[in-house]
Image (cartoon, helix red, strand yellow):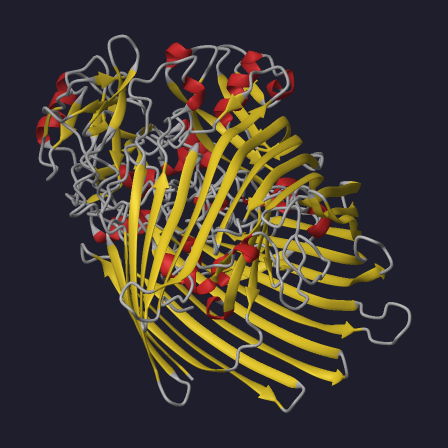
Amino acid sequence: MAAGAVLSLGAASALAQDGETNSDTITVTGTRIAQTGMQTPVPVTSVDAELLSTMAPGNIIEAVSQLPQFFGNQTPNSITETWFLRGGYGNLNMRGLGINRTLTLLNGRRMISSTAFGGVDINAFPEAMISRVETVTGGASAAYGTDAVAGVTNFILDTDFTGFDAHGQWGQTTRGDGDNYEVSLSFGTDIGDRGHFLVSGELFDQDGVFSYEDRDWYQGWGLINDAGGVPQLYPNVVSRNSSFDGLIVAPGTSLDQSEFLSDGSGIQPFVTGSPSQFPFGIPPARHSIANGGSGDDLGAEAPSLYPDVERNNIFAYADYELANNFKVFAQYIRGQNKTNQPNYPRGSLHGTPTAITIFADNAFLPDDVRQIMMDEMIPSFTLKRMGSLEDIGRDMRIYDDSVLHSITGGFNWQVENGGFMNGWSVDGYYQYGRNKRQAYQVGLRVDRIHAAVDAVDDGSGNIVCRTTLFNDTFADCEPLNLFGRGNASEAAVDWVVGYEPGDTITTPIYFADTGFDLGVTDTYTTQEAKVNITNMRQHLFELSASGEVYEGWGAGPISMAFGGSHREEKIRQIVRDPTNPPSDHDNGHPVLCDSDPEAIAAGLRGVSAPDCGNTVGLQYSKVSNINGKSTVTEVFTEVLVPLVADAPLMEQLTLHGAARWADYSGSGSIWAWKGGLDWQMTEDFRLRGTYSRDVRAANLSERFDKTGGSATITDPRYPGDGVINVTRFSGGNPLVSPEKADTITVGFVYQPSFIDGFSLSADWYQVKIDDAIGQLGVQAVADRCEEGALDLCDLVSRDTMTDRIVLIGDVFVNVDQAKISGIDLETSYQRDISLFGGDESISWRFFGTWLDENSETLAGTNKIDRAGQIGLQQSDGIAYALPEFKFTTSLTYEYGPVRTFLQGRYIGGGTIENSLVEGVDIGSNHVDSVFYLDLGVTYRHELDNGAGIELYGNMTNVLDQDPPVTPYYSAFFGYTQQTNQSVHDVLGRRFVIGARVNF
């Protein structure tokens, strides 16, 4: 795609935006009936691909995310609760209903998901060949099947491209970081009179941004309760539980509330700033050091404002007319997307759950500390610390490599037999898709850290791991000095971070649902990282036909489409973990407990209880092996019946109907249907409306996955305990039922004949989902169980002695109801002008959306409406991106070879968290609105032979707007998250310059 777009948002045809055409017969997204001059009762927005590139040069996901109907798309810098649970780095989320409820098509065909969690990664699409993007903002299950509850986005390729096109661009932020470049080459040619061939390739690379340098808006803003218990906003909020140098927790002793000096040579008192909240030494303890105090901002050392991103793509297409009106085609896509960023947290030793015990005979202890321990008879203390870039946190990172292959072969037959089905179009295709994602994690070895920090003198003046004095269980252990930062040896850091490469492992595989029953084995050679390999497979067959069934109807011909499809999807996810080779999370025990006979024999001591119950040796890496398959067989039909034509106030009244029957493995059969009316009252004014039943069956993760780990929650029965650590399990539920949605859209289109080139459309929508499939979050499970949701109490286990929560589940369940509603508005205007007496034109377009409700209700509990919530939820840190109002508008002026593009993007203000407004107040529970201004300039020089040279420049966030403050203090991470980068721009002003040559 070129940045020099002939069309802007304002120049795109008003007819195209409403799903109309007056040209040759085409099929518009949302219907399978091809018509001439058709209109659809559902809102269809069409945006030219050149415009998308002008809006956000580089990754197409960033451009699409600027369209207001999308809320919280998964982009490379989106906030996600768990990295392993991402759907990818280019997943669309329409209406804020989730990536699982947004169907993404390529040329009208489904593509394979990028992971088990659903969602298609559009970064794998051949961006250079995309001609336009059509979005249907309404239920479309009857037309396309499952996942279309929120709507459909269809990326349409230019398979008729002829000629040669070369494109290159480079850009960075005005702070000198985020360097990026993109190059692409495309070639298309005819093959005789009956065939066509094209091939395209592209490469994009962007350096990550891992620093707040020159971004003065970051001040560590966070919430701390005031004297009345109301959270208030303060700057420079840091942990009172952990630091890069190490804090001492030893209640009742003079060592308590001390911190180590950075060089590890001694200690000093930890100074508490004002205000502060929670007692020193527990995970949520924090204070503001704006006016003095001790502590480190654990999140500011290497923040991930944007990861390293690299993607490449190869696209090939050919078609040939074997006989008159019978064409065959073949298509191949290979798309690769790679990312790399620091792991968070980078070696957490602050009690979530790992904490370190330091004994009095530790050889690295400063003499004065050892003397105090001797004088006060202190056998040990707890060290709370976070890994630093200067020691164990230096090499911890997460990265992945996702590769998609898609092969499609099919035919189109335009029937011209003068008899049955004459004039119909018959299409059929088979598509094979494969996506392989290899996710890598380098982290802390919790199976080794306790042995390494227990360093003693061997009696000869040598510092060794204490365990080496007992036996060879930890024979290669390297003693680790964690007092202060940067004082650990390279050998010790290497021993407790990552795995030893080069070992060969052969192991049986334990699957989450079937154990060892499948008899699968895996052989591999270890590397530094833990590896999660997810292979997805998709087979898709489809046959469809459309045409006119009756021409003698007075209001116009009756048209129909029908067809059938069969789809099979498979997943096999294998986790390569040398500390638990089978990845058996039911019986695995890689971390020894102090009480284990093997640990006693090895002299191991000081292992924290939560760690010895862990089933993985690498911190925060619990992911299960998955093996599953789902199939669906579907038949569908659609009909278009003109009811009235050429009558007063009824120039055309047309009925649209569609139905689909689907039989899902594991879920059984289910119906989806749609009915709609399109009422052209006058030449200028049209009404439209639809009512549909949309369905979605559980995806592979929602059925087969199982993942465990730890979590921090507040026990609603004992809120005075503050934040506590619990064991968490989550994932698939084979009993989850399909969800059903009732969708209503009602709107109008106004194109006044007295204002040439102007169009206005507005649509009200409501989607009500019953038995919605989703996870509530561990805090919500605990809270709602206490509120009376008895079915959730089955997921909560309490200690029989203390009555405190020890185990909590967050499996996929059928939520009683989810509901959204709102209004969309589109306007456009375009015309030729002559301000300077030349060849000039001006165009304008506006997209706006009001979100009235985005709620969920569980039986027996209150409804939670999150419309307007654009902060990080205080109970669990989940980032919501649901502003009540936002818009994108643009103005393009063209004068001869020069085009100027000006775009404004507004994201309305909102709340940090809606659910706290009535129950628990938050001082300053408000998030400011923000307005972004973007600029693009293009110059094109036409050559005599029809070739062209184009030069362009684009600037995003021209005003360098700071992101609003949306504070959340994470007890798990130990630092405040000041912004919601799923909603707001954190990179700041940036630019791209480029050139294109085509002939």
Q: How many marks?
A: 0
Q: Residue at x 59, y 87 (%)?
A: 190
Which percent across, then down, holds residue 74?
45, 47
Residue 287 figure quarter: top left
Seen as rendered, the residue at the extreme top is 228
Residue 595 visible in this rendered orientation of the protein: no
Which percent across, then down, holds residue 965?
28, 32
Q: Residue at x 61, y 16 (%)?
A: 789
Residue 883 figure quarter: top left
Seen as rendered, the residue at the extreme right is 419
Camera-side residue of 579 and 97: 97
Picture layout, residue 992 above or below residue 920: below
Picture layout, residue 64 above or below residue 200: above
Q: In the image, is 833 to the left or to the right of 190?
A: left
Camera-side residue of 741 and 517: 741
Q: In the image, is 627 to the left or to the right of 326?
A: left
Which percent across, then down, holds residue 176?
18, 58
Quarter of the image with the C terminus is bottom left
Residue 364 visible in this rendered orientation of the protein: yes
Camera-side residue of 9 and 584: 9
Q: Residue at x 19, y 28 (%)?
A: 235
Picture layout, residue 126 above or below residue 533: below
Q: Residue at x 51, y 66 (%)?
A: 130
Which percent across, then down, holds residue 985?
31, 45
Q: In the image, is 614 to the left or to the right of 301?
A: right
